Image: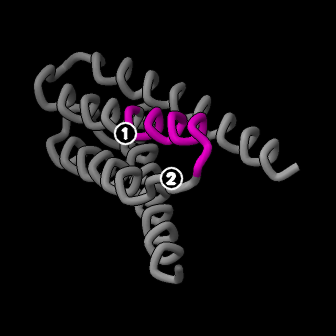
Amino acid sequence: MATQDNRTRNANVLVALGLLVMVVMAVMPLFNLFDANSEWMRWVFAAGAALVLVGRVMGTYRGSSLRIKRLHRILISSAVLYCASALLMFLSRGTNDWVAFLLAGLVMQIYASWMIDYESKKTEK
């Protein structure tokens, strides 16, 4: 069981690190720190999205609640949307189409995170 705990902890670290990298890269152009079209920012953002996806796949739910399993699949879907956002950064240069996928993934992640917490508390009672 200790290996499963380590795997979950490592997955959570990957997700947190990836989300932090993505937020920093998405916010930097807003404060005019760097140009939004710079090549290195795209690669760093894509690396953050990949970290989130790997972390989400590694941290799968192994319990018996079907609703929490579905919510974890929604978290994986949000990570796929982050990767689609990174892909759009490369494909549609000069536009902000990638922001739509980033925000869609964010909304899905917030919903799933809140509902996982709610369902976990409900099943503990």
The answer to which image quadrant residue 80 occupies is: top left
Find disc 2 in the rendering and name its residue.
61
Mark sitting earlier along the chain (1/2): 2
What stretch of residues is rendered in magenta? Answer: 64-77
Vertical placement of residue 45 versus 108, above or below: below
Percent across and percent down for residue 114 are: 68, 36
Residue occupying the far right of the picture = 125
Vertical placement of residue 54 versus 1, above or below: above
Horizontal side of 109 relative to 78 (left or right) equals: right
Which residue is painted at 44% across and 53% down in the image?
60
Residue occupying the far bottom of the picture = 2
In terms of depth relative to the viewer, which is nearer, 77 or 119? 119
Which residue is painted at 61% across and 29% down in the image?
111
Q: Is residue 46 magenta?
A: no
Circle 1 Cα neighbour tier, 10 Å, few/some/many (<14 / 14–19 / ≥20): many
**Most common secondary structure along the magenta stretch:** helix
Three-letter amino acid code at the position of disc 1: Ala
Disc number lying in front (1 or 2) = 2
The answer to which image quadrant residue 116 occupies is: top right
Which residue is painted at 50% across and 56% down in the image?
62
In terms of depth relative to the viewer, which is nearer, 24 or 32? 24
Which residue is painted at 51% across and 70% down in the image?
9
SS at badge 2: loop
Q: Is residue 69 magenta?
A: yes
Percent across and percent down for residue 119 are: 73, 40
Percent across and percent down for residue 79 are: 37, 39
SS at badge 1: helix
Find disc 1 in the rendering and name its residue.
79
